[in-house]
Each structure stands twice: as structure tokens, then as C-alpha cells.
Amino acid sequence: MRSSPDHARMFIEYAASEGAMPRMLGLVERRGFIVRRAAMAEQPCGRRATLALTVEPRDSSRSIDVLARQLGRLHGVGRVAHETALIQEQAA
């Protein structure tokens, strides 16, 4: 029996500026992840926002840790956190 990543939940705090969402979502997809769910909430000040994503790797070579570091390097991103869910694959 082997564990493989099924999906990950990511929480990204960022500056709510023009082009922020396409930059983040584009990076996620270019790095080999499928966006399964997305929710965004803006802070009352209107300058900061939080994006919650559920992503799934296209294959086992994709690392959620690497994706989180790459997102953290984007302009305007303040903090990135994630949690990973695992599924159990049974060998036949």
C-alpha cells in the first residue's frame, strides 16, 4: 500500500490589486496542478484579500511545497499556507 497526494488546500493572503488573481491561478496551472475549488474573501480595508484553493496534482512528480514557495514569490503575496490530504492506493 502506498500513499499519494490526492489534493491540497492552499490559503494565500495577498494584496488585492489588478491582475493578482490571474497571476496566482496561472502559476498554479502552469506548475501542473488542477484547480478544483476556489473561494476569495476581501478584507474590510479593501487592500488585502485571501484566496482559498483546493488543488490536485496532475501527476506524482508535482510538489505542493514547491508550489507554495513559488506562489510566495509572486508580487503582492504575503503568506501561503497549505494542508495535504492523502489517499491510500492498494496494490493489486
Image: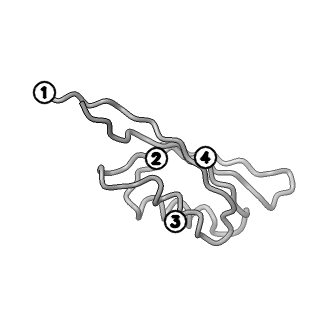
Which kind of residue does numbered mark 4 sit on? Ala
Q: Earlier in the sequence, mark 3 or mark 1?
A: 3
Q: Which residue is mark 2?
A: 55
At label 2, counting other C-alpha atoms closer than 10 Å, the crowd grade (few under 14, some 14-19, many 20 or more) is many
Q: Earlier in the sequence, mark 1 or mark 4?
A: 4
Residue in the foreground of this view, choosing between 42 and 88: 88
Q: Is label 2 in a helix, a strand or a loop?
A: strand
Give the distance between the C-alpha atoms of the residues marked 3 and 2, in whole angstroms.
Answer: 15 Å
Give the distance between the C-alpha atoms of the residues marked 1 and 4, in whole angstroms.
Answer: 36 Å
Residue at 59% x, 69% y is 74
Residue 37 is left or right of residue 21, and the answer is left
Q: Quadrant of residue 91?
A: top left
Image coordinates for residue 67, horizontal then vertical, percent: 47, 59
Image coordinates for residue 90, horizontal then vertical, percent: 22, 27
Q: Earlier in the sequence, mark 4 or mark 3?
A: 4
Q: Which residue is mark 3?
A: 70
Give the distance between the C-alpha atoms of the residues marked 2 and 1, in whole angstroms.
Answer: 27 Å
Q: Which callout, 1 or 4, points to the residue nearer the camera?
A: 1
